[in-house]
Image (cartoon, grey):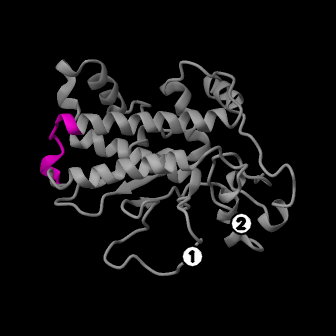
């Protein structure tokens, strides 16, 4: 059974039908959909800007993936803090009774509703072949559940003296790709920048793929959504209702995950 209303902070495909092109994104702009979304997109833009500046000193290349530094560590910590903030926002704006001391086990249940493990991100300017990142792949059905880059963040934050080498470019790029994925899984390609909304049709020219929010990283979205998981509504009609959005019951999802 498909869903007749969108969930808070949950971007997913819409079953094709009347007005489905417009309906597939317009609900994201509704003020009831998410609380202060610009607080999250603006923070992402700043992190992306600082990554581009880092690339002026460290070439984006296979050979440099082990490179570590204080600048990389600081950016890694900031990216992961933003990831945690986005996870908490998704849980708090839906139904989840736990509100304190949230951790990876809490965040992981969001994969069930946002298909994070099905996303991949590619960095466009690269010397080599290792520029595709799937930071949440291990949260998929066949994965271990372990996120090495997230463990690296915690290790080098709490014990820099012994774990400083973990603050490397590979872990940083996984974290920023993870943040890009989280932003996309909530807001699609809508960036909440000020000014008129402009829609265009065209290709990306030299680059093979679709650019995500921020127009820098290429984002490949999941292709494993079933029809039962998709949205099915006409936003032109639904937007007139006072109760336009539904809440995901993450308590139920967590309980089902434990019993399976």
Q: Quadrant of the C terminus?
A: top right
Residue 212 lies, with reference to residue 9, above or below; the image says: below
Whether residue 62 sits left or right of residue 220 in the image: it is left
- Which residue matches tag 1? 199
Q: Marks 2/1: CA distance?
A: 14 Å
The residue that appears at 46% across and 52% down in the rendered structure is 119
Residue at the image position 65 percent from the left and 57 percent from the top: 28
Residue visible at 39% across and 30% down?
146
Q: Nearer the viewer, residue 252 or 68?
A: 68
Q: Position of residue 103 (x, y in %)?
A: 50, 24
Camera-near label (2 vs 1) is 1
SS state under label 2: helix
The residue tagged with tag 1: helix, strand or loop? loop
Instruction: Point out the stretch of residues depicted in magenta.
Output: 61-71
**What's the mark number on residue 23?**
2
Residue at coordinates 43% horizontally, 79% vertically from top-left? 203
Q: Is residue 86 in the magenta section?
A: no
Residue 249 point in image, percent of width and height: 72, 34
């Amino acid at each position: 059974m498909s869903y007749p209303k969108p969930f808070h902070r949950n971007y997913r495909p819409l079953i094709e039908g009347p007005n489905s092109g417009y309906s597939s994104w317009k609900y994201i702009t509704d003020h009831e959909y998410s609380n202060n979304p610009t607080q999250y997109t603006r923070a992402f833009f700043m992190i992306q800007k600082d990554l581009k500046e880092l690339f002026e000193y460290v070439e984006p290349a296979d050979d440099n993936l082990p490179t570590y530094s204080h600048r990389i560590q600081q950016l890694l910590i900031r990216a992961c803090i933003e990831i945690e903030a986005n996870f908490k926002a998704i849980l708090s704006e839906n139904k989840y009774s736990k509100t304190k001391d949230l951790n990876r086990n809490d965040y992981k249940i969001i994969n069930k509703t946002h298909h994070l493990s099905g996303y991949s991100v590619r960095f466009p300017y690269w010397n080599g072949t290792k520029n595709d990142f799937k930071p949440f792949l291990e949260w998929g059905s066949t994965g271990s559940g372990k996120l090495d880059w997230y463990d690296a963040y915690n290790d080098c934050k709490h014990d820099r003296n012994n774990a400083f080498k973990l603050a490397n470019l590979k872990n940083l790029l996984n974290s920023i790709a993870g943040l890009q994925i989280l932003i996309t899984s909530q807001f699609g390609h809508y960036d909440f920048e000020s000014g008129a909304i402009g829609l265009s049709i065209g290709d990306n020219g030299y680059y093979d793929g679709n650019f995500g929010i921020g127009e820098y990283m290429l984002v490949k979205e999941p292709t494993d959504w079933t029809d039962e998981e998709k949205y099915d509504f006409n936003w032109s009609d639904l937007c007139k209702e006072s109760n336009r959005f539904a809440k995901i019951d993450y308590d139920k999802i967590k309980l089902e995950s434990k019993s399976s």
